[in-house]
Image (cartoon, helix red, strand yellow):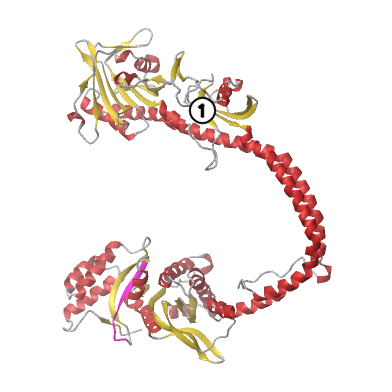
Amino acid sequence: MPFKTKPTLQQVFVISLFGLSAILTLLFLIVSQTSRTEIEESSERIRETASREIADRVAQILALPPAIALQFQYEMAHGLLDPRDPREIEPALAALLLFNRNLGEVTLTSGVRKGFDENGEIQLEESPREQWSVFRAQGADGADRIWSRHVHQENGKFIADRRELIPALKFGALPMKREPGTLADPTTDLTFVTPAAQDFYGMPIPSDLHWSQLDAAMPESQPRVEVSVQQAITDSAGAFLGVLRVGVLAEQLDAAMKLDLAPPGQGDPHRIFLCDNQGRLITKVAHGEHIEEVGIDLRVAPTGLPKEIAAALAEPRLRGLAQNDPPSSGRLRSDGEEFLTTFFPLTRTQEWIVGIVVPESYYLGKLAKMRRQLLTVSFGIILLVIGGGIFILRGVKRAQAQISDESLKMNSFDFSPAPTDSTFRDVTQVLESLEKAKTAMRAMSKYAPIDLVRRLYRENSEPTLGGQPMEISIMFTDIKGFTTFSEQLSANDLADALGRYLDIMARIIQGETHGAIDKYIGDAIMAFWNAPEPLPDHARMACLAALRCRDAGLALAHSPEWGGRPGFETRFGLHLDTALVGHFGAHDRMNYTAIGDAINLGARLEGLNKLYGTTIIASERIVDAAGSHFRFRLLDLVAVKGKNNAVRIYELLGTKDGASAPDATITDYEEAFAYYLSRDFTSAINLLEKHVSDAPCAVLIERCRDYLREPPGDDWKGIFIAKSK
């Protein structure tokens, strides 16, 4: 677009002022009209989601007893338990209770069936009739304890023995305590008679809330309430063995109702409860409530109910809900206050329903305040824009000049290219001048480390010949067999492959690990860390760069853009030492580089990979500095070519939690190397022969065999003299 056809900032500002006023007015109207609907729908979704979560919790609780009964029936049907042997029944029932902490009791009532009467009820032999129960009860100290109770016949009467089961001891060694008095026949209880009847024989029969039959043996002020499943148990031939009752205490249902829907730190006004479709509570909602008998059912006595829960329980919508109906949401009014409600029927229950009630003001009370605030802010913004418009318009031209001057300084040091086109012709001019400077700086950064360019730019200085001693971490890389690889490709393919490879290496070294690439030597790279900018953990970054470069090279070879060419296998040498770092060369042409003995040693370490069949070799100083973050293997004590002093060299295996080599190989190699240093070559060979597939192990085995054939001199200290680069 030509400059003269573009509007100026002043023109756009005036148009934007009127547009802003119109938009704010329209926004206010839209928000006012749609906010209430959206908030109500959001509230309904929150309540339905919470109801489903509560329903899932209750379903999990109610699904446990049938599953336990089915498991027990399976064990009986396959002859895994003898129902007449207390040494098997009592531990089996105890195991079910121990492994399922939500269970309150597991009871097996048994007898010998004679047949069924005309009403389909079971007829039993007079004896034996007995009942084994294992149940939970709190001790005097409040701790959860497991009790066993055995009801059996003695002299024609039913008596009970019980004992506390201590899992750490053998049950048979625990004493039984006789309960005083006589008991009713346990086979006359409805929880036995109903599932043993002909119509329900072998079917799991769920119950509503009921008193626990076992509470006669427990010292509690009020009997406990439970929900249970009863099922007739048969053996493999279908013969009747007894009735298993598996119960869950109602306390589990009370706990399942606890769900906080408010943000952290805020009180939750949502009231969640479990009731039936007659408006009778199944779970407690307030302290001090007790259970009472309502007809044939047990329900929570509605004492001191919050007004919203009392109103929700009286809702006519609740009376018509069946267990397969969808959730029902609505509103109710109580004492002049509006409430939102949701009723969620539970399937596979005695018409139980999860109810949630919350004050409407919790969601909509903020709406009126928000509308007032939005109206005030909208008019305030319009007045501020109009009042400041004249001042802003006067300063636009001056601001343009300031923007141009300040942008040319490029304090952010971001040289990445950006579009220069703009709606405003004056801003376009600024962007184009800025882009020219950025282009020049990007070109400079391709020939020198970016941190060096940044420092020279920040200090407004020119490079001068000279250097200073600095501790740096050095990395040399080289591609294995690159000469052979280059002979297989055309010049263009080779350039493309090498370019992709070096681009990935450079991105990891310079971008991810904050290193500086000193130079490219054909397919090789020399890089260092801690210069020109200090890097506290430079040794760790160097090791991390080597591992990531290795993995990235392998990934590149398997990527579609590699085009099926043979992959590059890179070898690395890592060293940490003091080197002379600075600008070297001629006055009109210089390089920022590092020189010194440390650089030569780093290059030699890379070359040693050929000898040991390794990928990454690091010096002892690297290991000392970064060993807490990575796993290394001590490889050898080596005097590299051109050096008299020996250095310990290590293989970098990976990070502490991601090393690829097996621990046994590493441990055996280092132990064998200790034998090697102590001249025990035979022990070293014996230890390594099971790891011959590991290249360093194979190298050390061969060297030990050479020394067995021709032992070293008395002055030998385990140093290997490397004769090649």
> Can residue 96 be seen in the rendering of this structure?
no
Based on the displayed image, in which of its 4 quarters is residue 528 positioned? Answer: bottom left
Secondary structure of residue under mark 1: strand
Asked whether 711 or 160 is in front, the reply is: 160
Residue 21 lies in magenta, yes or no? no
* Local crowd size for mark 1, using a 10 Å CA cut-off: few (<14), some (14–19), many (≥20): many
On screen, residue 259 above or below 558: above
Asked whether 114 or 394 is in front, the reply is: 394
Residue furthest to the top in view is 118
> Can residue 503 be seen in the rendering of this structure?
yes
Residue at (20, 34) in percent of width and height: 169
Q: Position of residue 155 (x, y in %)?
A: 19, 11
| Segment colored magenta | 643-653
According to the picture, the residue beneath numbered tag 1 turns out to be: 273
Q: Position of residue 648 (x, y in %)?
A: 30, 76
Magenta: main secondary structure:
strand
